[in-house]
Structure formats: structure tokens, C-alpha cells
Image: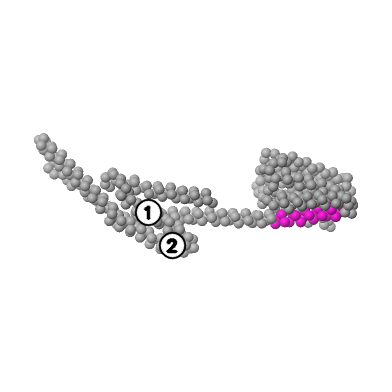
Amino acid sequence: MSRKIHISIFIQIAVWVLVFLFPLLFIGRESDSMITLPRYLRACILPLSFMILFYVSTLWLIPKYLFKKKYLQFFVIEIVLAVALVAGNYVWHKKMIRPQIEQARAAEAKAAETAAVAQGSAAAGDGVAGAPSAVPAAPVRRGPSPVVFFIRDLTSMAFVIAIACLVMMWSRYLRIEKSLQQAEEQKTKAELDNLKNQINPHFLLNTLNNIYALIAINQDKAQEAVHQLSRLLRHLLYENQDNFIAASKEVEFLKEYVNLMKLRLSPNCKVTFNSTIAEDERIKIAPLLLISLVENAFKHGVSPVKDSFIAIDISQDSSAITCLIQNSYFPKGAEDKSGSGIGLSQVQSRLDLLYKGKYSWEKGVVENNVYRSLLKLYF
């Protein structure tokens, strides 16, 4: 914000320097070619009028009247101010500048007449026939009429008012856009926080169900599961507060979860977990994004009596992180209460919020009754 303010101030100073240099282009055209400081300062009355009108409009009239839809008051005050400045400029020009211009012209005419008379006398003394006996008077050049003066300057004032309105409307548009963007970011953050708050109970529900089942089967494994759960909870509490964390930490969390889930599995279920994610803090991923996919694989990919498998493969290349999960498919019936079934919908919502336009996700049952989920997150 400070940088933008400095840039705005620099641009305004540069523009006004150019505006106040304009009189240098015209000084001397109506009289002699000499540019003096007093003459330049007297010619700066019009740029000074532009500056007064611009800042009165931008700092007071436009915010107070135009933006509050008080159009009549705005136009009346602008017209009165513009007419007052034009009238003051005309009086200044008539009383201060015009007499000096006429005086300079009279001096030019007198000097020209003297030179012509001297040239004629010299020619007569040399016996040149037809030497001029008189010098015609120089034509009197008059300034613009008051009507032309007022129309010209009022047009310039209207142009300044239009520029002031455009500048303020553009500035207001940028502020509104920024406010909308901030509101959208706050809304997105609130939605993400809400999804995270849903993920944690959903994750705990499934994990506690598994530990509950282990207690009846093997108390030693149940104790180990509680210990592993404590490490997982540490990750939930301290390492997933940001929208993105190091992908290597998320993979480590998934490994812990898979090891916890394997404690209650029968020997007829084969679980493999492979990862080629580098331990690089620059490679980021949304926390708890993949856990729902893994949970879904354990929920629908394990059978207590039939051979089953779960294969998890997480990799990366120069353009994306890829998560491929394949598992045998044993869909749960309506009577199965293990989990709330909201995991995949949460994944979709978070992908749309965090990776919009930067992900692809293919999921569904393929041949041999295998469920396949292929998620790619592009950098």
C-alpha cells in the first residue's frame, strides 16, 4: 500500500510539472521571444486554476456529492467554481498580462518605425529615387474577445473536471474490487475452516471405530493404535493450520494412518504404500486433502473373508503431484454405519476452493471390480 501511494504521488507531481511547463511554449509568441521569470509566473495562472479545480473536485465535490448521487448539487457547484476561476483568469489576463503585451507590441512597432525612417533617410541621402517618405503603421493586434476567452477556458475547465471524475471513479472501482476480493478470500477461508472442522471429527470417528474393534480382538494392538493415534492428533493440532503444508509431512501423516489401519486387518488383505515425494519445503499440498481418499479405500476395499488389496502410490514430477489409489471394491450396504460418507464430497469441495483449474480427478470402478482414484494436483 505504501508503494502504491508513493507511485500515485510521483505520477501526480510529474503530470503537474508538465502542465506548468506548458506556458513556456507560448510565452514570446505575442511579443518578443524573451522568457523571463515574472512573465512565466504571470502565465501560470491558468495551470494554477486547473490544479485548484482538480483537487477541489477530487478531494471534496466528487466524494461528497457525485458518489452520494447528489448530482444537481455537484454540477451546480462545479459550474460555479469553473466560472469563477475563468472570470478570475480573465481579470488577471486583462489587468496584468494584456497591458504588458500591448506595451511590448508598441515598443516593437516604434522600433520598426524608427528603423524604417532611418533606412529611408539613408536612401534619400544617397540620391535613391522613390525612397519612402512615410512608414505605414503596424496593424493593431487585439486579444480574443471576452466570449471567446470564456468559451475557451470553460472548455478547458470541463476537460479538467472530466479527468478528475475519471480518476476518482477508477480509484473507487479499484477499491471496490479489492474489497470484493478480500470478502471472497474471507468467504473461502471460512469455507475451508468449516471443511477442516468437519474432516477432523470424520477422521476421528473412523479411527476410533477401528480401535474399538481392536480392543475386542487384540488389546496389545489396541494400545499401539492409541499411541499411533496420539501422533496423528499431534499432526492435526499443530501442522495443518495453514492452507498448504510441505507435501512430505502430509505423506508421513498418511503413512502413520495406514500403519494404524493395518493393525486390524486380516492376513487376506494386502496393503502397499509407495511415495516418491521429496523432503522439500517448497513442495506444498493442502493438509488432510488425501486422507479422505485413503479412508475411502479402507472403508470399501477390505473384506473380512475375501482376498482384498489396497495400493497407494504418491509421486511427483516437474508439473504435478499425483495420488493413485486402487483397491478391491466391496461397497457397503445401507446398514453399515462405519463413517458418515462425507469424505469424498469434502475432497471435491476443497479441490474446487484451493485448486480450481489446477487439478484433475478420475474416480470410479474399473475392470475386475477394482475402484480407482487418480488425483493430479498441478503446480
Which of the pair 37/64 is nearer the observer? 37
**Above-or-below relation of 172 to 379:** below
Tag 1's secondary structure? helix
Quarter of the image for residue 157 reads: bottom left
- Mark 2 belongs to which amino acid? Phe
Please give the label number shown on residue 48.
1
Residue plotted at (13% across, 41% down): 132
Q: How is the image coloured?
A: one colour
Please provide percent x and percent y for residue 336. 83, 56
- Magenta-colored span: 194-214
For mark 2, give the secondary structure.
helix
Q: Quadrant of the C terminus?
A: top right
Above or below residue 133? Residue 173 is below
Residue count near mark 1 (Cα–Cα under 10 Å), binned few <14, some 14–19, many ≥20: some
Q: How many numbered tags mark residues here?
A: 2
Looking at marks 2 and 1 on the same chain, the residue that comes earlier in the sequence is marked by 1
Residue at (34, 53) in percent of width and height: 45
The answer to which image quadrant residue 246 occupies is top right
**Residue that carries the numbered disc 2 in the rendered image:** 74
Please provide percent x and percent y for residue 67. 49, 61
Asked if the stretch drawn in magenta spans residue 70, the answer is no
